[in-house]
Image (cartoon, rainbow, N blue to C red):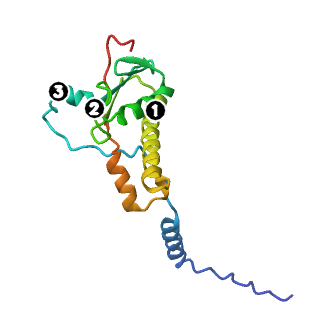
Amino acid sequence: MLKRKKKKLEEMNASSMADIAFLLLIFFLVTTTMDVDKGLLVLLPPYSEEPPPETKENQRNVLDILVNSRDQLLVKGELTEVRDLKDMAIKHVNNRGANPKYSDSPQEAVMSLKSDRGTSYNIYITVQNELKAAYNQMRNEYAKQKFGLAYEDLSKEDQKTVREEYPLKISEAEPEDFTGEGG
């Protein structure tokens, strides 16, 4: 009988496997995108220790908006529905000194938003959206009146002119626990 020679199995050279795995890891790290959480884009004014002087003239230009823990809205001390906030904001800003309860001019008008710690996120965002919608509507109407185009269709320079006429001034106070207001 003939003896068969057993063939030796050749071993695979695995020395370059670590390099390949490292290159694949680098490739996936470079090509993968990470989702970034987005929040509200709000430009905060510089911090000041001194409170602004409160005079009747200054108070006239401020539209006080309070949201309590029951998601009820008080505008200038009166219970108001959220759906009416946009029209009230427009009336306040566009007053131009006609009614002593509202602002002197769009440049002087300020929306002062204060909420209770128990205010729901949904109502807070809804109030923010209503205020911004009011400004968007006023800016759009002014742009059509002055330039004959919608605000979005204007050049950057013309948009700046419209924003100077209707600057978005929303003052947000630190949430706190209201007392005596149903909250």
Q: Nearer the viewer, residue 103 or 179?
A: 103
Residue lying at 36% horizontally and 36% vertically, measured from the top left: 93
Circle 2 — which element? loop
Q: Residue at x 45, y 18 (%)?
A: 70
* Depicted 33 relative to depicted 46: above or below: below
Q: Position of residue 68 (x, y in %)?
A: 39, 20
Residue 159, visible in the rendered structure: yes
Instruction: Name the residue furthest bottom.
Output: 2
Tell me whether the residue at label 2 lies in contact with that at label 3, contact meaning CB atoms closer than 8 angstroms. Answer: no
The mark found on residue 86 in the picture is 1
Q: Which residue is mark 3?
A: 55
The residue depicted at 38 percent of the width and 17 percent of the height is 78
Q: Earlier in the sequence, mark 2 or mark 1?
A: 2
Give the quadrant of the C terminus: top left
| Residue where numbered disc 2 is placed | 61
Q: Is residue 39 left or right of residue 52?
A: right
Residue at mark 2 to residue at mark 3: CA–CA distance: 10 Å
Residue 55 relative to residue 88: left or right: left
Camera-side residue of 128 and 163: 163
Amino acid, disc 1: Lys
